[in-house]
Image: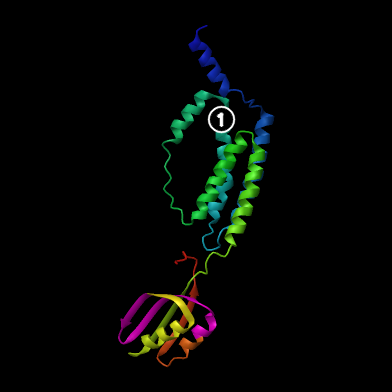
Amino acid sequence: MTFKDIFKKSFIQGFTRYDATPENIIVVFLISGFFALYIFFAYRLLTRRTFYQKSFNIALPALVLITAAVILTIQSSVVISLGMVGALSIVRFRTAVKDPMDLVFLFWAISTGIICGAGLAQISCVLAFVLTVALFVLDRLPVARAPKILMVSGEGADVEAEVMACVKRHCKVFTVKSRALSGGRLSLVIEVRAKEDAPLVQEIAALKEVTSSTLLAHDGEVTY
């Protein structure tokens, strides 16, 4: 037996050490299913309600099970693994990710499937605990107060000056996002970070030239 034969034999045996018995496969899928359900409920509780998508949430547990099945198949045969790598390389995903947190859960689901498929369930358990605590703490950590959108409509030449005077009294930081004038009617959209919301809206609404004053909260990015 030549060195080439010895190397080839040891290489192939290194990929066929996994005992793919029905019992082992069932255990792997049961453990993967447990973590898949955990990720399902974690995404529902930790993600923002505005960006929640039920279809994406259902896809996460399915992705865990599919990835675990792929890892089990790869471990059973090196020939199948090479063919599967070639087949998966032509798959293209064109779905836009609306929230960066979706990427976190997407990689979490894929990683859990890989880890469970490799028979390292204890790592998945530690990962689930650490990641859940980290996401929960960081989501509630007060980094900066999110700005709000102030929408004001009014008529008259001095309405903008009076509105901006009120905004300056209640807000240290503000930015005029939009200014529209049509038929003598002025519409302002201002990004504000007020000390107290109610007094600002009430004072602006009390102006004679102002016809409506609305303050909206949004889930966009915080600007410094």
Horizontal arrangement in the rendering, residue 38 relative to residue 56 (left or right): right
Give the quadrant of the C terminus: bottom left
Magenta highlight: main SS: strand
Residue at x 44%, y 50% (from the top left corner)? 95
The amino acid beneath tag 1 is Thr
Residue at x 60%, y 35% (from the top left corner)? 117
The residue lying furthest to the top in this view is 1
Across the whole image, how many numbered discs are drawn on residues? 1
Q: Position of residue 178 (x, y in %)?
A: 36, 75
Q: Is residue 65 above or below residue 212?
A: above
Q: Position of residue 162 (x, y in %)?
A: 40, 88
Q: Secondary structure at mark 1?
A: helix
- Figure quadrant of residue 157: bottom left
- Look at the image and say whether residue 178 sits in the magenta stretch: yes
Q: Which residues are magenta?
A: 177-201
Residue at x 55%, y 61% (from the top left corner)? 48
Question: Is residue 37 among what the camera can see?
Answer: no
Residue identifier under label 1: 73
The residue lying furthest to the left in this view is 183
- Look at the image and say whether residue 187 sits in the magenta stretch: yes
Horizontal arrangement in the rendering, residue 133 relative to residue 212 (left or right): right
Q: Is residue 40 above or below residue 200?
A: above
Q: Position of residue 107 (x, y in %)?
A: 53, 45
- Figure quadrant of residue 186: bottom left
Q: Position of residue 120 (x, y in %)?
A: 64, 36
Q: Residues within 10 Å of mark 1 (few under 14, many from 20)?
A: some
Q: Is residue 209 above or below residue 145?
A: below
Residue at x 47%, y 28% (from the top left corner)? 83
- Figure quadrant of residue 165: bottom left
